[in-house]
């Protein structure tokens, strides 16, 4: 196994450490909940959910986090102001995990972090996400509401190469720092199977050059794979999901947005196997430097 020649930064989010050399800290695993079409959501506009089923899912992720030692976070998706506020409040009552505020609507995300500030949750919040095309009002809202961590998504229109991803991530750092984001998490952007390897290559470059925590939404490689079920069979999607989520971990990822929270039952054990192996090499200092 390798280690990065650049000193690696470790951020503390709540009680969770993210970042460092491969094997230094367990990979942080982030499950998405209340996403579009999630069967526990009864009304996307209001954020009304099946509370018992939701709590079971959150506790199930926490159970696998305890079994493996891999810290967990929750990517909370809300489509409206009313929904995101309600969902953040519900999740905060059920779990102590850090919360990623996520939405396709910037207005909803801004509403979410304003609500978090009002109820004293701002230190548990990670803004998901900032991009090069993000409007100034989002950066301003982050600053005004004391949010000190955000996912910096290395995406720009027609992005293709790992070098493009590296450039996008670096361009985001200045604006995010000015907004008070002291704990940036670099997401090298996976959208499909071909982009998984490119995202991993960008991650290696960013950790080598900047030493910041890096990861990606690796599950997108499978969720956007048209014809996978037809080609492989419905039960063979799971191995592909495991493979795509583990691949960045093998290359030193600090966090993984692994997809629907239901997948915790097979993603956590798979990542734990890699982390356990690398931990021994890290302690033995049996690595080569890149």
Image (tube, rainbow, N blue to C red):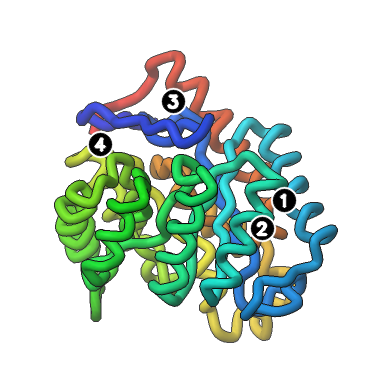
Give the mark, 4 or 3, whose residue is nearer the N terminus: 3
Let me know if residue 246 appears in the view.
Answer: no
Would residue 287 appear left or right of 169 to someone viewing this image?
A: right
Q: Nearer the viewer, residue 21 or 201?
A: 21
Q: Count numbered badges in the picture.
A: 4
Give the mark, 2 or 3, whose residue is nearer the N terminus: 3
Q: Nearer the viewer, residue 131 or 90?
A: 90
For residue 261, which numbered disc appears in the image?
A: 2
Dot 2 falls on a residue whose secondary structure is helix
Relative to 37, residue 188 above or below: above
Local crowd size for mark 4, using a 10 Å CA cut-off: few (<14), some (14–19), many (≥20): many
* In this view, the mark in front (1 or 3): 1
Residue 178: percent from left, percent from top: 17, 49
Q: Nearer the viewer, residue 233 or 169?
A: 169
Are the residues flagged by discs 2 and 4 in contact, CB closer than 8 Å? Answer: no
Would residue 201 appear left or right of 249 to someone viewing this image?
A: left
Q: CA distance from mark 1 to mark 3?
A: 26 Å
Relative to 132, residue 246 above or below: above
Dot 1 falls on a residue whose secondary structure is helix
For residue 197, which numbered disc appears in the image?
A: none
Are the residues flagged by discs 4 and 3 in contact, CB closer than 8 Å? Answer: no
For residue 58, which numbered disc appears in the image?
A: 1
* In this view, the mark in front (2 or 3): 2
């Amino acid at each position: 196994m390798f280690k990065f020649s650049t000193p690696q930064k470790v951020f503390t989010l709540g009680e969770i450490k993210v970042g460092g050399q491969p094997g230094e800290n367990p990979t942080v695993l982030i499950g998405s909940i209340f996403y579009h079409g999630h069967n526990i959501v009864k009304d996307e506009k209001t954020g009304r959910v099946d509370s018992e089923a939701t709590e079971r899912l959150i506790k199930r992720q926490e159970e696998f986090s305890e079994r493996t030692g891999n810290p967990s976070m929750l990517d909370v998706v809300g489509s409206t102001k009313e929904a995101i506020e309600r969902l953040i409040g519900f999740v905060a009552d059920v779990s102590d995990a850090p919360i990623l505020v996520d939405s396709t609507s910037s207005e909803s995300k801004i509403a979410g972090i304003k609500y978090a500030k009002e109820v004293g949750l701002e230190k548990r919040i990670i803004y998901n996400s900032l991009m090069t095309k993000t409007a100034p009002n989002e950066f301003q809202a982050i600053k005004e509401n004391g949010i000190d961590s955000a996912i910096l998504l290395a995406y720009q229109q027609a992005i293709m190469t790992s070098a493009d991803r590296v450039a996008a991530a670096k361009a985001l750092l200045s604006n995010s720092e000015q907004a008070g984001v002291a704990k940036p998490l670099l997401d090298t952007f996976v959208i499909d199977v071909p982009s998984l390897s490119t995202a991993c290559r960008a991650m290696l470059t960013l950790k080598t050059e900047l030493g910041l925590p890096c990861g990606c939404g690796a599950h997108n490689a499978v969720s956007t794979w048209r014809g996978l079920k037809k080609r492989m069979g419905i039960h063979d999607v799971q191995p592909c999901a495991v493979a795509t989520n583990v691949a960045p971990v093998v290359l030193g990822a600090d966090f993984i947005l692994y997809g629907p929270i239901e997948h915790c039952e097979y993603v956590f054990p798979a990542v734990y196997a890699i982390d356990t192996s690398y931990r021994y090499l890290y302690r033995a200092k049996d690595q080569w430097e890149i």
